[in-house]
Image (spheres, helix red, strand yellow):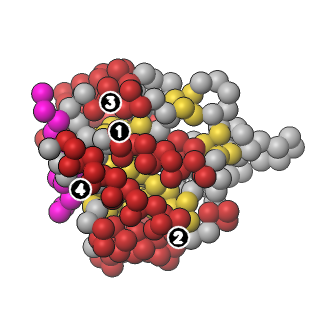
Amino acid sequence: MQMNTIQIQNISIGPKQPLAIIAGPCVAESLEMCLEVGRAMRDCCGDLGLGYIFKASFDKANRSSIQSYRGPGMDEMLGWFKTIRTELGVALTTDVHEANQAAALGQVCDILQIPAFLCRQTDLLIAAAQTGKVVNVKKGQFLSPAEMSSVVEKLVESGADKAGIMLTERGTFFGYQRLVNDFPGVMDMMGLDWPVCFDVTHSTQLPGGGAVPGEARITGGRPECAPMLARCAVVAGVQALFLEVHPNPSQGKSDSATMLSIDQAKALLPQLAQLHAVVQNQAM
């Protein structure tokens, strides 16, 4: 079968389409900060001919420490999303953690994202599919690429193929506080006939690597590896990239060890646009 193309507002994601960029802060810390990041990424992507989708989480339910900041909550974020859409005119996506959240989020978001640790939760997948919005599922760190076929089957059976499905690679656990990206596995996921997104910044995580005895546990990271991984993913032929971007990553309330600054993201995106053009030309 030929890979499907999904349509989100004026953005097409699929074969022979411009590279799509999903970017924003890991967690929404304030409306003003979301607008700052979203505006910068929108303008940069627009100048490069790349599709742009804004992403931020309203609740980081899977944190290393109970003391960590989780976000503004869904009710407040629904209002923020409406303002972001109105002021920036961009497509939106966020994580859905519970089945009872899907309907409300589907009213304001264009893509509902299923977190990696929840990718096998059948009720959550069904609820997201029933909103009629595109569903993006992150591959669990504990799954092989081939096992994502069962996730796709659940979504198709629930009607998600009408709006569209996307799968995201974000690294696999290998037991030594590091995530490893399996690029042959990325190719295998593309064989499931839906666009594949590569999560650049989460792939640089060192789970538990920032833990300090007696202090709140955090996840470490190697953000200096993000440009290399992004370039590899584009050369591998993915249709979308996910980047967590923050005005001041070291001060971020979540994923401070892995996020890119706005300036770093703006420096990287032209390289990725050029690489994508080369890959597209070779595929013709």
The C terminus lies in quadrant: top left
The N terminus lies in quadrant: top left
Q: Earlier in the sequence, mark 4 or mark 2?
A: 4
Residue under numbered circle 3: 187
Mark 1 vs 4: CB contact within 8 A: no
- Between the C-alphas of marks 3 and 2, the distance is 31 Å
Specify few, some or many for label 1: CA neighbours under 10 Å numbering under 14, 14-19, or 20 or more. some
The amino acid on which the numbered mark 3 sits, given as a three-letter code, is: Met
Magenta residues (range): 1-15
Instruction: Place residue 12 in its image quadrant.
Output: bottom left
The nearer-to-camera label among 3 and 1 is 1
Picture disc at residue 111: none
* 9 in the magenta segment: yes
* 46 in the magenta segment: no
Mark 3 vs 1: CB contact within 8 A: yes
The amino acid on which the numbered mark 2 sits, given as a three-letter code, is: Asp
- Between the C-alphas of marks 4 and 2, the distance is 22 Å
Residue under numbered circle 4: 18
The residue lying at 40 percent from left, 69 percent from top is 41
Q: Earlier in the sequence, mark 3 or mark 1?
A: 3
Q: Earlier in the sequence, mark 1 or mark 4?
A: 4
Residue under numbered circle 2: 263
Q: Main secondary structure of the magenta part?
A: loop
Instruction: Place residue 238 in its image quadrant.
Output: top left
